[in-house]
């Protein structure tokens, strides 16, 4: 259960956006959300537990071989392809957002900065994400779509 204090959130709409994305889009490489609750000033999100932890923790303590890296890349690309086909851009891909199950399956998480693109709004210019992980187009505030 992920508990988020709404009083400490500068942009509450991002939290609710994350819940909507996780509720509406299901893929084998995207973390499943089971339910969400508003409890007082907190938003509780009940989601799949991935006991393998974040990729960040793994690469900090382990040297991955080429096959393992390829598996991670393929899984993340499958998740992104699915989201992009639905008109969703993630905008915060980083090792903290890539989680693993105990049997080595890879899933994408952390949808707080996601945005919808469509024929009416095919590009975005918002400066969002984690600075060291941002695409140059985002930092430069150039219009971008699913390619970032």
Image (cartoon, rainbow, N blue to C red):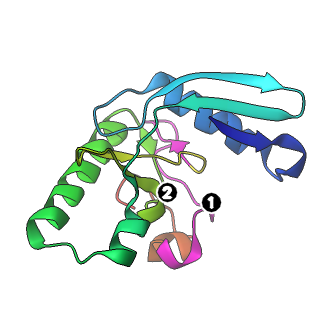
How packed is label 1: few (under 14 Cα within 10 Å), some, or many (20 or more)? Answer: some
Magenta span has 117? yes
Quarter that holds the N terminus: top right
Residue 87, position as x, y percentages in the image: 41, 37
Image-quadrant location for residue 13 = top right
Mark 1 or mark 2, whichever is nearer to me:
2
Q: Tag on residue 91?
A: 2
From the viewer's perspective, is residue 58 above or below residue 49?
Answer: below
Image-quadrant location for residue 63 = bottom left
Pick whichever of labels 1 and 2 is earlier in the sequence: 2
Q: Residue at x 36, y 51 (%)?
A: 52
Q: Residue furthest left?
A: 67
Q: Residue at x 49, y 57 (%)?
A: 91
**Along the line of sight, the residue nearer the viewer: 80 or 70:** 70
Q: Is residue 17 left or right of residue 70?
A: right
From the viewer's perspective, is residue 143 above or below residue 44?
Answer: below
Q: Tag on residue 112?
A: none
Residue where numbered disc 1 is placed: 126
Residue 29, position as x, y percentages in the image: 30, 40
User: Element type at marker 1?
Assistant: loop
Magenta span: chief secondary structure: loop
Label 1, label 2: how far apart the Cα atoms are: 10 Å
Quarter that holds the C terminus: bottom left
Residue 132, position as x, y percentages in the image: 52, 79
Q: Residue at x 75, y 42 (%)?
A: 4
Magenta span has 25? no
- CB-based contact (under 8 Å), mark 1 and mark 2: yes
How packed is label 2: few (under 14 Cα within 10 Å), some, or many (20 or more)? Answer: many
Q: Residue at x 29, y 75 (%)?
A: 62
Residue 77, position as x, y percentages in the image: 25, 51
- Which residues fall within the magenta stretch? 114-133
Residue 9 in view: yes
């Amino acid at each position: 259960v992920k508990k988020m204090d709404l009083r400490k959130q500068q942009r509450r709409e991002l939290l609710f956006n994350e819940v909507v994305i996780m509720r509406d889009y299901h893929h084998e490489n995207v973390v499943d959300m089971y339910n969400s609750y508003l409890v007082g000033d907190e938003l509780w999100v009940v989601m799949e537990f991935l006991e393998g932890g974040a990729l960040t923790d793994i690469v900090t303590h382990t040297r991955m071989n080429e096959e393992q890296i390829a598996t991670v890349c393929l899984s993340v690309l499958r998740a992104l392809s699915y989201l992009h086909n639905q008109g969703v851009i993630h905008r915060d891909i980083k090792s903290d957002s890539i989680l693993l199950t105990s049997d080595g399956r890879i899933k994408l998480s952390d949808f707080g900065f996601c945005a919808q693109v469509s024929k009416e709004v095919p590009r975005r210019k918002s400066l969002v994400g984690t600075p060291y992980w941002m695409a140059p187009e985002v930092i430069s505030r150039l219009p971008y779509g699913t390619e970032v």
